[in-house]
Image: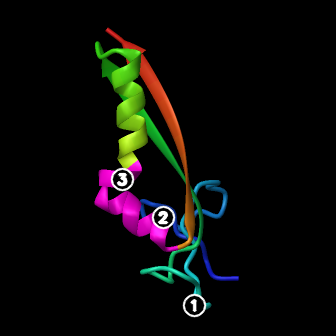
Amino acid sequence: MPTPLTAGGSRNREQPDRLLLNNSKSKGATPWLSGKIRLVINVTTSASGADIEKVKADLHRFCPVSKVVRNSNTQIEEVWNVTRL
């Protein structure tokens, strides 16, 4: 199994959220990404609940990094922490 890399480039095997280097054939634009990424999003806002839900729904449609990662056969688990002003 290849040595896992965390998003920050660390080779810490204890890190649960990581990108795995993979030379196997996979579907998508970047076959070297695989596995699952936990994306923690911390938001402090006075926006309405409906506005926040729209941003959540639109993230995967408009974020170019999210598109590349999702198209590489990598799952993204989004964790939203919303703090109201």
- Residue at point 43%, 22% (across, down): 82
Q: Earlier in the sequence, mark 3 or mark 2?
A: 3
Q: Position of residue 73 (x, y in %)?
A: 56, 72
- Residue 18: x and y in percent read 56, 61
Dot label at residue 70: 2
- Give the Cα distance between marks 3 and 2: 11 Å
Q: What is the residue that sits farthest to the right in this orientation?
A: 1
State the CA–CA distance, disc 2 to disc 1: 18 Å
Residue contact between numbered discs 3 and 2, judged by CB atoms under 8 Å: no
Circle 3/circle 1 CB separation < 8 Å:
no
Residue 2: quadrant of the picture: bottom right
Taking the spot 55% from the left edge, 79% from the top edge, the residue there is: 21
Amino acid bearing label 2: Arg
- In the rendered structure, which segment of residues is drawn in magenta? 60-72
Could you tell me the amino acid type at mark 1? Asn
Residue linked to disc 3: 61
Tag 2 secondary structure: helix
Q: What's the distance in space between the residues labelled 3 and 1, CA to CA?
A: 28 Å
The residue that label 1 is drawn on is 23
Between discs 2 and 1, the one toward the N terminus: 1
Residue 29 magenta: no
1 sits left or right of 76 in the view: right
